[in-house]
């Protein structure tokens, strides 16, 4: 056997002369690895650490989401208005198309990409477990949707404060709004990632998520409108179960009271409880599906 | 490094990927040779604790693959056979991220990624998106991610696949260095025996999921090692002189195959060729010994 250096030519020789150093520092456990993957994926959801092309879509959508809030905040501050033209919890629902497109664009970016390009083999041949992978991806996508929907609320709050509106009522509205978008973020991330994890082809994943959410929202809105016109407020309320946006808004109404941001809120306290249970079941169901999906993934 | 005992893997009733495999992989560079479908990749997945065996035992670095898969994956690097790189990140970002996925803290991950990419021969390219890389560069990134956490052992699945001859030589030289200069044990699979004998200390041959041979490379090739000699003229006289000196000579076309191979044989050839002024065209060690060995069905 030959094989001691030098047979790779002068260029290879120069590479290797640097000498190999062993690593004897700390190796972090599963918790730290999961957290690191979550942060990496959250950045990735906004295209950070990716090519410039990957940044265009998420940043554009973030700007579109923030722009109305910025304009409202500026006008309110300049005119010293005594009331915001939009209620905090209604903002994300009014702009739900933007949120849906963000989710549809970035969910496949987050999980289909790893499946499609087999990056998953590199993850699962490491200490990272399948459950930890799912946890991290869910946390990251929830975080991304939360950033997208919570930032404009902070802008609105800033505008309200500059306009000298009362602190406590605005703080309360902001708080309710933040809780609502946090729940919304978890629900949407669960749905988006589940659809994306079953559609490795990115385009199909995008289309499936947009179609599902927009159609559900449209159907829910139509059914709610018809029910109300026929005088059935309860029917209109129940129809809100059909779309994640009205579902989560129903949970908020149940938690904090106040008017629904859709046509009608859940009918009564029992109705609110049903909305909450459906929300929990939806998230749990998606999580279970994701775990099943990733248990089936083979490393190749 | 790796020990298996009566390891068997069946898929369903009819497909047997590994059959009663009992073998030891020593430290150093070990070649795992077999045709496509011989069970090499199945064995690697079992060793990583990613695929449960049907029966039998296996341990890696004295850790049981059944129960301590996560601990094994912390200490072992794996280079998959198939493409596994996302196109939209740079090699540096990818390798840093994967170092962190092996548990390295951020600063260490950055340092190790930079070092490792340099060791596998990626320089300015590492700041470009992986999507634009050649096959050779992609193989280097895959190798770098397997080494970045300084494993005790790396499992390389067909690392020379798809490389041109020069790229193949570079990769083999790199694998040899990992085993010697880096001090990391290597298991490298290939369906080509010839290329592995150049870099491996030990070779394990499997076929149809069964162990065919496990032996030190020197032991395996020593018995049939031979020199190929080509001279421009007086070939028969050269052969006669060599036979007279106790070397076995077998003419193959215009070539002479000589055995045994030792320093004395080289000296003798030099002297004979010089004395007869025969014009040395070529003197090379035979390349395909292990393949011949396997083909003859030697035990």
Image (tube, rainbow, N blue to C red):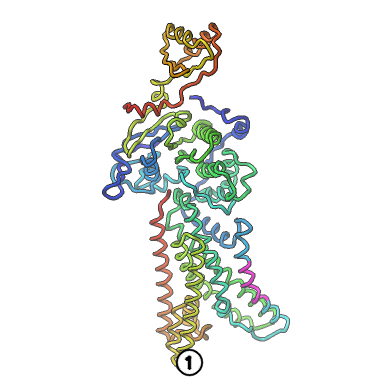
Q: Check residue A61 for magenta coloring.
A: yes
Q: Check residue A106 for magenta coloring.
A: no
In the image, taking residue A162 as reference, residue A237 lies left or right, namely: left
Q: Write down the quadrant of residue B38 in the picture.
A: top left
Q: Write down the quadrant of residue B137 in the picture.
A: top right
| Residue that appears at 42% across and 44% down | B72
> From this viewpoint, is residue A136 visible?
no
Front-most of B205 and B98? Answer: B205
Horizontal and vertical percent for residue B158? 46, 40
| Residue that appears at 50% across and 14% down | B266
A214 is higher (above) or lower (below) than A18: below
> From this viewpoint, is residue A240 visible?
yes
Disc 1 residue crowd, few under 14, some 14–19, many 20+, Cα 10 Å? few
Magenta stretch, residue numbers? A60-70
Horizontal and vertical percent for residue B125? 63, 45
| Residue that appears at 58% across and 42% down | B117
Horizontal and vertical percent for residue A150? 58, 72
According to the picture, the residue beneath numbered tag 1 turns out to be A229
A154 is higher (above) or lower (below) than B95: below
Horizontal and vertical percent for residue A272? 43, 82
Q: For numbered disc 1, what is the local secondary structure?
A: helix
Front-most of B151 and B210? Answer: B210
- For the view shown, which residue lies furthest in the right direction? A78
B28 is higher (above) or lower (below) than B84: above
Q: Which SS does the magenta portion mostly show? A: helix
A27 is higher (above) or lower (below) than A172: above
- For the view shown, which residue lies furthest in the left direction? B13
Q: Chain of mark 1?
A: A
Q: Write down the quadrant of residue A58 in the picture.
A: bottom right
Front-most of A109 and A253? Answer: A109
């Amino acid at each position: 056997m030959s094989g001691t250096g030098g047979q790779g030519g002068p260029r290879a020789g120069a590479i290797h002369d640097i000498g190999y150093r062993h690593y004897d520092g700390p190796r972090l456990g599963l918790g730290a690895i999961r957290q690191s993957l979550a942060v990496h994926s959250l950045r990735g959801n906004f295209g950070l650490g990716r090519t410039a092309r990957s940044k265009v879509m998420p940043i554009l959508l973030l700007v579109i989401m923030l722009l109305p809030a910025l304009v409202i905040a500026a006008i309110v501050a300049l005119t010293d208005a005594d009331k915001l033209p939009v209620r905090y919890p209604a903002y994300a629902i009014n702009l739900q198309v933007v949120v849906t497109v963000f989710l549809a664009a970035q969910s496949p970016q987050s999980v289909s990409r790893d499946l499609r390009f087999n990056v998953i083999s590199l993850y699962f041949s490491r200490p990272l477990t399948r459950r930890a992978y799912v946890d991290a991806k869910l946390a990251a996508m929830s975080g991304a949707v939360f950033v997208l929907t919570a930032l404009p609320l902070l802008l609105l709050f800033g505008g309200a404060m500059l306009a000298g509106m009362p602190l406590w009522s605005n703080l309360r509205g902001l708080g309710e709004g933040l809780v609502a978008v946090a729940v919304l973020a978890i629900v949407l991330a669960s749905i988006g990632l589940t659809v994306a994890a079953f559609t490795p082809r990115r385009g199909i994943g995008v289309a499936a998520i947009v179609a599902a959410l927009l159609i559900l929202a449209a159907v829910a809105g139509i059914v709610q409108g018809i029910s109300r016109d026929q005088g059935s407020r309860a029917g209109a309320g129940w129809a809100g179960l059909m779309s994640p946006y009205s579902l989560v808004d129903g949970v908020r109404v149940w938690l904090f009271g106040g008017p629904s941001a859709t046509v009608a809120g859940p009918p009564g306290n029992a109705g609110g409880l049903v909305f909450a249970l459906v929300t929990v079941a939806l998230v749990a169901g998606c999580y279970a599906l994701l775990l099943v999906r990733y248990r089936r993934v083979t490393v190749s | 490094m790796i020990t298996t005992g009566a390891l068997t893997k069946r898929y369903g009733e009819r497909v047997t990927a590994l059959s009663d495999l009992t073998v030891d992989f020593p430290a150093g560079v070990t070649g795992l040779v077999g045709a496509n479908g011989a069970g090499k990749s199945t064995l690697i997945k079992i060793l990583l604790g990613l695929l449960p065996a049907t029966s039998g035992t296996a341990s890696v670095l004295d850790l049981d693959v059944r129960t301590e898969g996560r601990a094994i994956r912390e200490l072992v690097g794996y280079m998959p056979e198939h493409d596994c790189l996302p196109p939209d990140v740079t090699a540096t970002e990818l390798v840093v991220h994967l170092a962190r996925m092996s548990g390295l803290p951020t600063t260490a991950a950055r340092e190790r990624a930079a070092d490792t990419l340099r060791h596998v021969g990626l320089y300015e390219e590492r700041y470009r998106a992986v999507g634009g890389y050649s096959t050779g560069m992609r193989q280097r990134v895959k190798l770098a991610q397997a080494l970045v956490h300084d494993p005790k052992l790396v499992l390389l699945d067909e690392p020379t696949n798809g490389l041109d001859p020069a790229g193949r030589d570079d990769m083999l030289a790199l694998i040899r260095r990992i085993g010697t200069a880096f001090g990391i044990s290597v298991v490298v699979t290939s369906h080509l025996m010839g290329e592995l004998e150049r870099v491996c200390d030990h070779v394990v041959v499997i076929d149809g999921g069964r162990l065919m041979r496990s032996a030190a490379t020197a032991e395996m090739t020593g018995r049939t090692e031979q020199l190929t000699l080509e001279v421009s003229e007086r070939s028969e006289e050269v052969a006669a002189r060599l036979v007279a000196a106790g070397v076995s000579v077998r003419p193959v076309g215009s070539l002479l195959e000589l055995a045994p191979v030792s320093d004395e044989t080289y000296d003798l050839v030099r002297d004979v060729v010089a004395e007869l002024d025969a014009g040395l065209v070529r003197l090379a060690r035979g390349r395909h010994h292990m393949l011949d060995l396997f083909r003859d069905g030697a035990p």
